[in-house]
Structure formats: structure tokens, C-alpha cells
Image (spheres, rainbow, N blue to C red):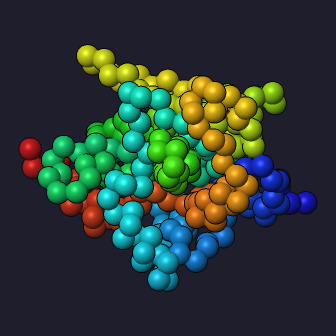
Amino acid sequence: MPETRTYGRRRRELPATTSKTEQSGFEVGKREAVTGRVVSTGAGGPTQMAGWDAMDKAASASGSDMYLKVTEEATVIKILGDGPFDVYNSHWIDEIEDGSKSVRCWGTPDCPLCQIGDKAKRFSACFDVISLEDVDNPVLKVWEAGIKVARQLKDIATDAKRGPLNRGDLYFTIKKEVKKKSVEYTLERVKERDLLEEYDVEPLTDEALDAFLAEAHQWGDVVKEKLDEDAMQEVVDLVMED
């Protein structure tokens, strides 16, 4: 029997997950590749990207515009999936001068950075969300939630009364507070009926949700690809130089 997952206001039947990897309490399912998507082919293996849609996707996602920027002002968001489509830990490499300093951990004992004692300290659970920061121009973003917020989301998702995360009448607000030595995030549930009165935001229509769902990631898609052995060795050499 197919596994039922809910998206927006409609229920859709998706193929049952053939295998799952549990990471920090979240289960990330692997699904078949979709044209123009980046999909992991297995632990430690390469990723595949092909097609003109993939080229446009890679070009548009090469910067930071694809990510949700959480600010000190509460942003209304709509979560599209019922769980994170990608979960990973990453190393932070200060020695990298050009490009991202964040390097995805292999998640296996043979990770070269782990082997030299560099711990993967950052946790990311990735969700597709519709940002309603600009109420006249809702946009699809990838939200990389840290472990504290991710656990809050899991509690909501697995609660029969409060979940699932993508329930049709459920929205969220997220904001951050910068303190001297830390950043704290505040997540709140918002019922659809309260959006207009409390946040001056109109609920999304079914048509708008369907349009965003067509562009959303599939379960098992990869936000940050693993470096191959050669590239990872270059990072290791860079770290060991100091």
C-alpha cells in the first residue's frame, strides 16, 4: 500500500519509501530522481544532476537567495513537507577563503575531517517553506533549522493534535534574538484563521500551494553536496597547514 503524505490542503499518495536513514531523530526517505533535481545516490556516493532545468536550478541556487533569512522580526512561513527533506551535519573551516566555509560531513567513520579531529558541529534539518515576509510576493525558500528548532518541529509533527507540519490550516512564525554569545530562535504556530487579524497576511490559495509544491524538493534531495575524496583532501591539507 502507498504511504500517505499530506501537502497543503490536499492529500496525495506518494510511493512508499524503500529505505530510510535516521539522523538525530529525523527519518530522511530516499525517493527516485526527478528531472532537474539533485538527488543523493547513496551514502558516500556521488550526486547526479542533469537536464536544462537542473542547470537553471543550480545557477539560481549558487548564492544564498535560496535560503530563508531569519531576522529579529517575525516572519510568517508555510511548511510544505511533513518533515525535513535533507538532514546533515557540517564542518566549519575558517581556513577556506573563497566560497562557503561550511563543509558537509560524510556522516561515516571515514570522513577525512572527522579523522583529523575536526568535529562536525553544525546540524541542519532542511525544509521547503513559503516565506510570506513580503505578503504580496510569497517565495519558496529552503529553511535550514538548527537542532533546537528541529526538535520543536518534530514534537509538533508527531503530535496528533498539533501536526502534521504541512496541515492545511497551519502556518508558523520564526524570528531570532541576538544575544552576547548566542542566537536564540522563537517558533510559534499560527492557525490560518488568525493570519489576517494577527499578522495582516492572507492565507495562500490552493492554486498558489500547488504551484509552490511543483517546485519543492523531493525527499532525499541534497542541499549541500558532499565533497569527493580529492576535494575533501584539499580541505584537510588546508587545515593541516596551520
**Does residue 83 show up?**
no
- Quarter of the C terminus within the rendering: top left
Q: How many marks?
A: 0
Task: Return the residue found at the far top.
Answer: 180
Q: Is residue 74 left or right of residue 9?
A: left
**Does residue 226 show up?**
yes
Residue 95 location (% of width, % of height): 15, 47
- Quarter of the N terminus within the rendering: bottom right
- Of 33 and 207, the residue lying toward us: 207
The residue under the point 58% across, 64% down is 215
Residue 45 location (% of width, % of height): 48, 67
Q: Is residue 7 left or right of residue 105?
A: right
Splitting the image into 4 quarters, where does residue 199 fall? top right
Q: Is residue 110 left or right of residue 161?
A: left
Residue 17 location (% of width, % of height): 74, 58
The residue under the point 41% across, 29% down is 73
